[in-house]
Image (spheres, rainbow, N blue to C red):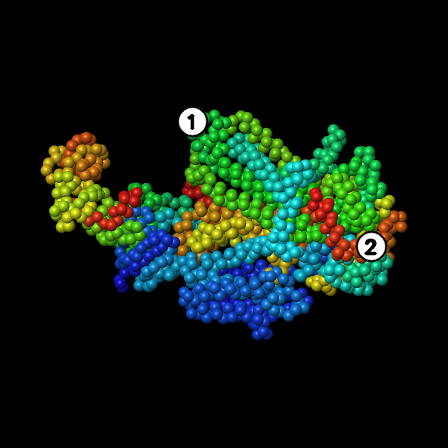
Amino acid sequence: MSEGALIFDNVGKAFGRFEAVKDIAFTVKTHELVSLLGPSGCGKTTVLRLIAGLEMPTSGRILIAGKDVSRVPANGRNIAMVFQSYALFPHMNVIDNVAYGLVAQKVPKREAHERAKRQLEILGLKALEERLPSALSGGQQQRVAVARALVLEPDVLLFDEPLSNLDAKLRRQVREEIRDLQQRLGLTVVYVTHDQSEAMAISDRIIVMRHGRIAQAGAPRALYEAPNSAFVADFMGDANVVGAEVADGVVRLDGLTLTTDLAPGTAVDVVLRPEHMRLVREPGEAMIRGTIHRASYLGAVAEYRVDTPIGALLATDAEHEEVIAEGATVGIAIDPSDARILPRGDEAGLDAADPRL
Amino acid sequence: MLRPSFLWLVTILVASLLPWYADGPGGFVSGGLLGLALSGLAAVWPVALAAIAVLAFVVLDTRASALATLLVSLAAAGWILASGGLSGLPYDAELPLSLANQPAIGWGATLAFFAFLGLMGDALARRGVMDGDPFGTHLLVFASAVLAVFVLFPLAQVFQEVLRPDAAGSVAGGLADHLLGKDVWGLSCLTGGRRCGMVWNSIGLGVAVGLATTLLGLAAALFITRIRTPFSTPARLITLLPLVTPPFVVGLALILLFGRSGSVTLFLWDAFEIRPSRWIYGPQGVWLAQTLGLTPLAFMVIHATLVSVSPSIEEAASTLRASRWRTFRTVTLPLIRPGLANAFLLTFIESLADLGNPLILGGGFKVLASGIYFKIVGAQADLGEAAGLGVILLVISLGVFLLQTLWLRNASFVTITGKGDGGQPARLALPLKAAVVGVTLLWGAFILTVYGTIILGSFATLWGRDYTLTLANYVDAFNVIAGDHGLVWAGGAWNSFGTTLMLSTLAAPLTAALGLLMAYLIARRRFRGRRTFEFAAMMSFAMPGTVIGLAYVLAFNTPPIEITGTAFILVIAFISRNMPIGVRVGLAQFSQLDPSLDEASTTLGAGPGMTLRRVLFPLLKPAVATAIIYAFVASVTTLSQVIFLVSPRYDWATTYIIGLVENTNYGRAIAYSVVLIVLLILVVAFLQLILSRVEFRRVDDKTSRETA
Amino acid sequence: MPKGLNRAALTAVGLVAFAGAASADELVMYCSVQQSWCEATAAAFTADTGVDVAMQRKDTGAALAQIRAEASNPQADVWWGGSGDAHIQAASEDLTEAYESPNIDQLQDWAIEQYETADHKTVGIYSGVLGWGYNTEFFDRMGLKPPLAWSDLENPDYEGEIQVANPNTSGTAYTALATLVQLYGEDEAFEFLKRIDDNISEYTQSGTAGIRAAALGETGIGIAFLHDVIQQAAAGFPVKAVAPSDGTGYEIGSMSIIANAPDPELAKQFYDWALTAKAQSRALEAGAYQIQANKAVAPPPEAPKLEDTKLIDYDFAKYGSAETRSHLLKRWDDEIGSQR
């Protein structure tokens, strides 16, 4: 356990009867950027607040830089956090905001301002020192919030959905900046988001959470290509999840036959990524037959909703020169190695209850 | 880090050397806890033992010892108060000190009491309450202690007085005597008798005042928001004037106008031979005075609701072909209904609590508030019956308050989006507009007449007989003469004026601070019993001043806490009565402050103290200013709360003025009132100025950015 | 300990210190004569001796109730003025303390008699005759006949025109009640009070309120001590004093030192001072027309001559006793006060 900058040792957190975090264990290594990903209410923000010390765990231990900080309040932990709303103090100018944490740690005011200035320079905010937060653009506010956190040289830097208040274009640019900064300065970062593309773009590792537990953790590519549940598959990008049953070592989806080692009679979810589905104008054997219900041209790709005997499926096509007309009959061909067959977990019922899925 | 517990233990050590009891009658001077304990006074042993036990627990420092600390400290704090004689028996200097015969607590016991509370706060933090933050738990313990000792304990005394058995020793008989008097519930006025009982008088008056103020408030609010006139700013100012006026001053002006020797009455007599009558003395007069005095309150509530109705909703109605009248009746009115109900209930509560107007205008018409007063001041003082009336008044008032909080909190349809909604508020239908303008202008003229009378009356030699202008009334009240031993503040008003000014200045910031800190706990901390705490904190808002005064007289005239006749009792009464407004304003403000701001401060390493000082306090400045202004104005203008608590040393402006009115010394009374009103306007303006400077600074920054 | 807590503790300690520190050298006095005389006396004492006075005017009955309520923790040193029977009751309840002033022999006999009756626990300082004043302007304009005897007050023309105080709070009103009882006998006195109840607009709290209201024209007739009527007339108000021709009572305004007073030495200093001719001669300047107890002070020329009025033989000992007082007040409350 020694090399972890942050260790969660079977941590649980309950609010009254509601268990927000159930017995979670993970480790974040030094210089690593780990994302916590999941739908709202999955407990990812609670985990972040537990790291920050804004919540105290009901069970388990939290170690930061090798020290047990489970009972240490936020102001005693060497962490820093960038809030979703940035939480810049509206009545202080930029330099006072950035120097605030240093002043709180009894750094002499002069020195605090010096260090704050240097930090602002690194982030290219030097010209804004005297401004009030209300006089800054969203992107500038975000960078000031980062500067305010970085100046403390924390053991772990925390981000709580830092991009959600930015417009789409800026979001991409800022997330690259964050990743760049993290790698340049060798920061240890825990990053909360509900946006899988953001998580994939930025992270060394992703922890997908659900109902207060870790659903799956791993490198972005591993999660995308080898999800261990329909939930992870669905959350990591678009996926068609089709329910089926194993019969004689195979799973049949209309014309498509997939082989499997699973015992006959096992209920399974078959995950089909839209980009793996090839639409053929003349349906053949070993294909799923269907009609185009809706066709949308999105520029880079064309997106189709296809009505099939096994339900409506989403397919994307980046190759066809022209868009297939709505109402046309098509066949869907899939390379069996691209389909993932997952035994259906116990949480199938819960999935149905969650309106987001 | 050194735990606060050690500092509290040192505090107990210091406290044990200070005089444990207050100086008692017969030249009694107390020794310290240590001396008393060693001299064999068993009554103080438990305290000393508790301190030693807690020391052991704190050194052990386990979770279980924290629980033990908590319980032992609670017991010790309770013992300090109980051992002083919770029975309410006075200390008898003739008898030796013993468990049952002890004087009031002194410096030592007070300090030790605080220290035990502090130990409880720290122990709670050790137990993990509020995530182990000692600042929050200390705050919780101290605030709860304030509520328990200065709100709940006095109230309990009132109930105890009501339950006191009658001469035959029967509790039921005592209850009947105290609660069921004929002058309380009588309904003889319905059957041709002279008077109904005070309960019906109070309720009837309250309903009549509530209806009238709500209608007037609605008219004024519509006038200001929906009708474009050059008068809207002056109209606003005029409606707010009564807020800085002691309520009964309006009643006094009514006497000068409509009394038997009032100017209007005499004019009517001279011009039309209308025989002067005493119609102003009775329910009508009280109703008129309260309506004039309380309409601003109704106005503010309704105005706030009205401006938050999005104009686009009314525009939507008119695009659906509704006429102006129909739009008003079917859209606007239902939307502001919660505001109207709120205004009605608030003014109802205030009318119930008002003592001054029934006192000077009531004549034989008695309401509960004045009934309590008369039961106490006379030579036949009957505390039991006074307490009975107090309980009845309290139950009505708290009932309405509960109704207001539970029912109306969820009944608001108005959503405040914070987005600038475009569009114009709907115009009013013509007949409605005419009515609104008519009523508002008439009322405004009436208010102006009343205030004109007040100002003129203060300079008139003798109202009704000799209108020669003079400064005599002011000189009379605020005279300074030279005596053999230096200046003598001979004007009768100086004592009460000085006390009022000083104690209000002292109480206002403390009230605001306590209220806002409680709001901070409620809004920002999670702990068990938070809702109960919130209710207890807000409850004293609905406690009529006379009931608080009565409760304080009953609770604090005997050991353990003996503070009648001191400045302390006045300050405490103001704090516990006015603190709910701080809580209310604070809660509103906190709900608009992003919690991430305090969390950001904490994650940046700041402790709760620095967070409060550097982040929350500056952002709460408007709430702070509002709470301070309210607390100051409320304590200067209150009569009902102080009337039983004043003493020769600490007289209050309002009680002094009411004494003058009672002696028909109208000139001086009104001159003094004018001084008070002017003073209040200046103070409010000054505080507003400090507040608005913050606003200006922000605007300046914006403009400088735009020009740059 | 966190900084914020330190500050809170400091504030609390400061507040307590403030509350405690305010008990400087100061005479605390309840005063039961008219406001102007109270203030003039307090100011004169300060001017003569340099001792500050905290004075609160309280109607006689209210002052008695207050002193009784505070008995376990007395707040005031001295009770100055107010009709004697309340002072005698206070003495009989041991609420006040005996004191033998060196200045006692300067007083009139009736003042010393009061002093003896109460075992030296109170002393007479002024006296005054009970009666009423009526507003002459109002009577002229309405063509009413002024009431000259108690029985005249039953005249239905006076409906709603009489003001008298509540005997529970006012010494004046209690004197009137006791006078009527001594004049008519108890039952007949209460019958009389019930008969004139319709004529009475209001039972005020203060004994002087009625006559002030009559002076202003707020009411036609105010029952009061004649010195209060004369004071109003001298101030230029159209009121005329009437001493009832069928006999009337009088009061001996008194002064007492409160038992277990916070500062008994100051109380005695004031007591001695208040009996001097120098102090008592100031009454007239303050517009008080009472007959002063000090023999060296001449009665004011406007004051009613005791020998010209038909005075009853007022039994101060009986009507000042707690038993009689409580009985009469209870009966008044039951039959008159609570019927309102």
- The picture places residue B553, in percent across and down from the top left corner, at 63, 55
Judging by the rendered image, the residue that carries numbered circle 2 is: C315
Residue shown at the point (75%, 60%) measured from the top left: C92
Q: Amino acid at mark 1?
A: Leu
Residue sitting nearer the eye, B638 or B194: B194
| A348 horizontally vs B677: left or right | left
Residue B320: mark: 1
- The picture places residue B407, in percent across and down from the top left corner, at 48, 42
Q: Residue furthest left?
A: A285
Residue shown at the point (61%, 63%) measured from the top left: B104
| C116 horizontally vs A112: left or right | right
Q: Residue furthest right?
A: C307
Q: Residues within 10 Å of mark 1 (few under 14, many from 20)?
A: few
- The picture places residue B411, in percent across and down from the top left corner, at 47, 40
Residue sitting nearer the eye, B406 or A329: B406
Query: Quadrant of the image for the C terminus of chain A?
Result: top left
Q: Chain of mark 2?
A: C
Query: Quadrant of the image for the N terminus of chain A?
Result: bottom left
Helix, strand or loop at label 1? It is loop
Q: CA distance from mark 1 to mark 2?
A: 87 Å
Q: Amino acid at mark 2?
A: Asp
Q: Chain of mark 1?
A: B
Residue sitting nearer the eye, A268 or B227: A268
Helix, strand or loop at label 2? It is loop
